[in-house]
Image: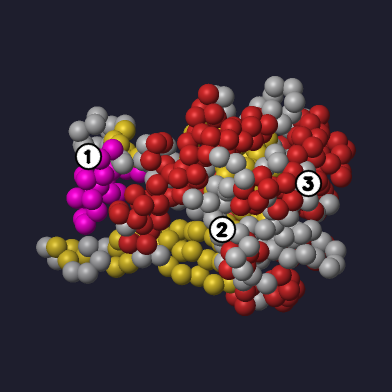
């Protein structure tokens, strides 16, 4: 799996803490640099997907591209096509032999509604023509007042129009992002409402989001994130200046509960804390993240996770026989600097080490990451990951209280790989999952 970060935005959202800039030049230089990094890391990209023989995929690997940001839809379509072609060459070692449309298990691009409206059906058709199979659109809210406060460039009407344009262009896998966890009265003081009316308001927002197409066609996927205060964001400054106060926890919990019930009634599978999908439309790329699958991050501020396998000589011998070597696997996290200019300069000089850092994860770090990521999903994690060491007693307590449940296997704790049960957080405890996970790591 390959993630490509486009750090460009036309404006900055109130809540955003991701690395992004407003470009003052064309996009070609960044695209050149991204393609150069993809080429430089071809071996890493290919090994994350295929076995050394190249004959078949590694177990658990997914062959996906995700172009995120920032705002990837600010790029002209020909630039996105160049990135897709570079990934195609990296994975398959050729530019021919497979159609771009069937080359990847999933190819997602994030878009803003205003870019889709500006480009129209022709732009959307061209975007899909690059091989894109999934479009993730940042809607965030269906209330124009909230969108203005968030410093979004679109309004609710534009979100609806963009959705219809994508459908007309042939998009059959659309995900929309929503944000919950805010008190409308704290955003627009004149709109202060009671708790009962607050629930009704949130219901209206959800109903409007589900009817975004105006024709009864539901989005295939919905991601909903709680409004959070990110360091360096405009929202953090507003709170420090006393211009905004975070919503009360019980209001956020009520909104999340309503979100879960409304989307369940609409037929969505709640497969991860923040993600809901119609049957068969669970995000392959993001699901692989939560399974701790290796991935390659391309672009400024992008992170990667890779496996490095080698052999070490075993100490000692038995009956005079050399015990030989033992295969060891290290997990390495690496990242690129948050600096577009330095990144482009590195691509021109070939000195990628000047913008890249890395660390080898310890066994405990690896275990903690697998727990944190896996417990975000409705599948959970293998019980053996938790029911050992210091966390075992805490896990038993959480099981007794219902904060964890056992699923799969034969429900008896057997460790047969084919029947080992999983432990997961039930949906009614998802909202407090951070507290539950913190007890286990």
Say the numbered circle drawn on residue 245.
2
Q: Mark 3 points at which residue?
A: 154
Q: Position of residue 279 (x, y in %)?
A: 55, 26
Q: Mark 1 points at which residue?
A: 400
Secondary-structure class at tag 3: loop
Q: Position of residue 80 (x, y in %)?
A: 77, 51
Q: In which quarter of the image is residue 205?
A: top right
Q: Residues within 10 Å of mark 1 (few under 14, many from 20)?
A: few
Label 2–label 1 contact, CB within 8 A: no
Structural distance between the alpha carbons of marks 2 and 1: 36 Å
Say whether residue 62 is visible: no
User: Foreground: 56 or 235?
Assistant: 235
Secondary-structure class at tag 1: helix
User: Which stretch appears magenta?
Assistant: 381-402
Q: Position of residue 189 (x, y in %)?
A: 65, 51
Say whether residue 360 is visible: yes
């Amino acid at each position: 799996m390959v993630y490509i970060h486009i750090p460009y935005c036309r404006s900055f959202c109130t809540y955003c803490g991701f690395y992004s800039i407003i470009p003052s030049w064309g996009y070609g230089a960044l695209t050149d640099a991204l393609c150069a990094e993809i080429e430089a890391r071809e071996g890493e990209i290919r090994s994350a997907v295929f076995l050394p023989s190249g004959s078949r995929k590694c177990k658990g690997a997914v062959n996906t591209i995700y172009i995120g940001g920032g705002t990837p839809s600010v790029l002209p379509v020909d630039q996105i096509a160049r990135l897709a072609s570079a990934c195609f060459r990296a994975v398959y070692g050729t530019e021919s032999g497979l159609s771009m449309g069937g080359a990847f298990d999933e190819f997602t691009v994030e878009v803003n509604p205003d870019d889709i409206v500006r480009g129209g059906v022709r732009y959307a058709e061209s975007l899909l023509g690059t091989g894109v199979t999934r479009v993730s659109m940042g809607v965030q809210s269906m209330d124009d007042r909230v969108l203005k406060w968030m410093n979004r460039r679109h309004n609710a009407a534009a979100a609806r129009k963009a959705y219809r344009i994508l459908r007309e262009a042939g998009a059959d896998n659309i995900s929309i992002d929503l944000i919950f966890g805010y008190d409308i009265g704290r955003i627009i003081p004149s709109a202060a409402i009671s708790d009962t009316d607050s629930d009704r308001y949130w219901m209206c927002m959800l109903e409007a989001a589900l009817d975004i197409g105006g024709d009864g066609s539901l989005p295939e996927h919905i991601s909903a994130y709680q409004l959070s205060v990110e360091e360096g964001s405009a929202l953090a400054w507003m709170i420090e200046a006393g211009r905004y106060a975070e919503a009360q926890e019980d209001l956020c919990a009520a909104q999340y509960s309503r979100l879960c019930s409304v989307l369940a009634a609409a037929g969505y599978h709640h497969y991860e804390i923040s993600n809901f999908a119609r049957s068969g439309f669970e995000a392959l790329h993001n699901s692989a993240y939560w399974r701790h699958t290796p991935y390659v991050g391309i672009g400024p501020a992008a992170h990667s996770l890779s496996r490095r396998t080698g052999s070490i000589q075993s100490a000692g011998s038995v009956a005079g026989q050399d015990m030989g070597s033992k295969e060891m696997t290290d997990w390495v996290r690496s990242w690129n600097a948050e600096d577009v200019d330095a990144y482009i300069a590195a691509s021109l000089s070939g000195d990628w080490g000047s913008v890249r850092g890395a660390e080898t994860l310890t066994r405990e770090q690896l275990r903690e990451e697998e727990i944190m990521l896996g417990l975000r999903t409705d599948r959970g994690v293998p019980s053996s990951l938790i029911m050992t060491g210091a966390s075992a007693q805490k896990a038993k307590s959480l099981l007794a209280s219902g904060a964890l449940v056992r699923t799969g296997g034969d429900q008896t704790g057997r460790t047969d790989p084919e029947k080992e049960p999983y432990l997961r957080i039930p949906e009614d405890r998802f909202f407090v999952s951070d507290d539950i996970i913190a007890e286990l790591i």
